[in-house]
Amino acid sequence: MIISPEQVLAALRNVEDPDLKKDLVTLNMIKDLKIEDKNVSFTLELTTPACPMKDMLKNACYNAVKHFVSQEAEIEINITSKVTKPMDINQLKDIRNILLVSSGKGGVGKSTVASNLAIALAADGAKVGLIDADIYGPSVPTMFDLVGAKPSARETEDGKTLILPIEKYGIKLLSLGFFADPDQPVPWRGPMASNAVKQLFNDADWGELDYLVVDLPPGTGDIHITITQSFPIAGAVIVTTPQQVALADTRKGLAMFKMPSINIPVLGVIENMAYFTPEELPDNKYYIFGKDGGKELAKSFEVPFLGEIPIVQGITEAGDKGAPIALNKESKIAASFAEIAGKVAQQVAINNSLTVNC
């Protein structure tokens, strides 16, 4: 039989993206369809390289062509991605999605999560930047072995000076810690701190980014309000630990994003330090800070629960050495961060589909 493009596209209309609730042809995710005799090839263009369902969608496309067109078809499916953004905007037009990593209090591992999340997104092929906006306790210089590093700058044709982010592990990085003595406190009032953070967005040469991850300071202060009201935010990730003393503050931090004056989508909750497993007893879990606090928080606010990160000595050691654990492909924790990154990217794509895709 002769296979036509119309037959293949009709078959692929039976494959629905389970998140976007539309078929792949309607979503314009089928590209470069080519047919030669019984050979059928096309590209499946996903909404993010971190899509956790890429294999499922590829298999569904393969089966649809076999079932609805011909069992004899020889099928080749290539997978690419084009990351969507919330809306067509001029401000920071080369940055498709700004992701905030937030918590209600310090000490819950927010910077560790932000750093590893950025690395996990980049490992899937996304273009990623990371801003350390925690002006009073910047951690990115330590997490990336860049203590004492100073960004360079370039001058544009119109005479404006732009900061050049430092690149490491495939990520573009800027931290307020790059501009201050690491041994000196930063006694800045709110407006001064907020202006300094805005410069990391507006006065930096970020180039094209799929995701710009922002490590926010603890609490719900001036910097949070400045960023959420000054820039188009794709969503916020909430980090907590299981115990009630952390959840009480995290609850307030999550509620801040839902305030009408801020109204930022909450992509989900990550529970850090969820349990402890001794190396010599890999099947045991000890919930030393309580159990399921993050899950219950996510449930009460009706937002996704993105996953658990256990207490593991290797996480601390990797961060202190300046090589976050997500870089270690042999680590189970790296796999956990990869899974969480996929879920974050998934939620971003779902939210973006509700506005204007590009």
Image (cartoon, helix red, strand yellow):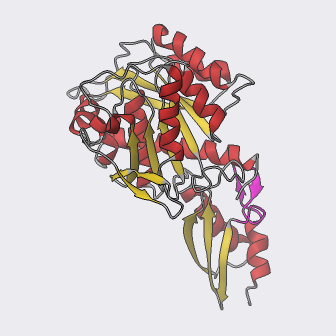
Query: Can see residue 270?
Result: no
Left or right of 320 in this view: 109: right
| Quarter of image, res 48 | bottom right
Q: Is residue 109 above or below residue 286?
A: below
In this view of the protein, which residue sits in the foreground, 77 or 174?
A: 174
**If the image is split into quadrants, where does the N terminus sit?**
bottom right
Residue located 72% across and 54% down the image: 88
Q: Position of residue 179 (x, y in %)?
A: 34, 37
Q: Residue furthest top?
A: 245
Q: Position of residue 104 (x, y in %)?
A: 51, 18
Q: Position of residue 225 (x, y in %)?
A: 61, 26
In this view of the protein, which residue sits in the foreground, 311 or 130?
A: 130
Left or right of 78 in this view: 108: left
Q: Is residue 110 above or below residue 345?
A: above
**If the image is split into quadrants, where does the C terminus sit?**
bottom right
Q: Position of residue 4 (x, y in %)?
A: 76, 85
Left or right of 91 in this view: 185: left
In this view of the protein, which residue sits in the foreground, 122 or 12?
A: 122
Residue located 64% across and 19% down the image: 255
Left or right of 216 in this view: 263: right
Q: Residue furthest front?
A: 159
Q: Main secondary structure of the magenta part?
A: loop
| Quarter of image, res 280 | top left
Numbered range of the magenta stretch: 13-28
Number of numbered discs present?
Answer: 0
Residue 272 shown in magenta: no
Query: Can see residue 322?
Result: yes
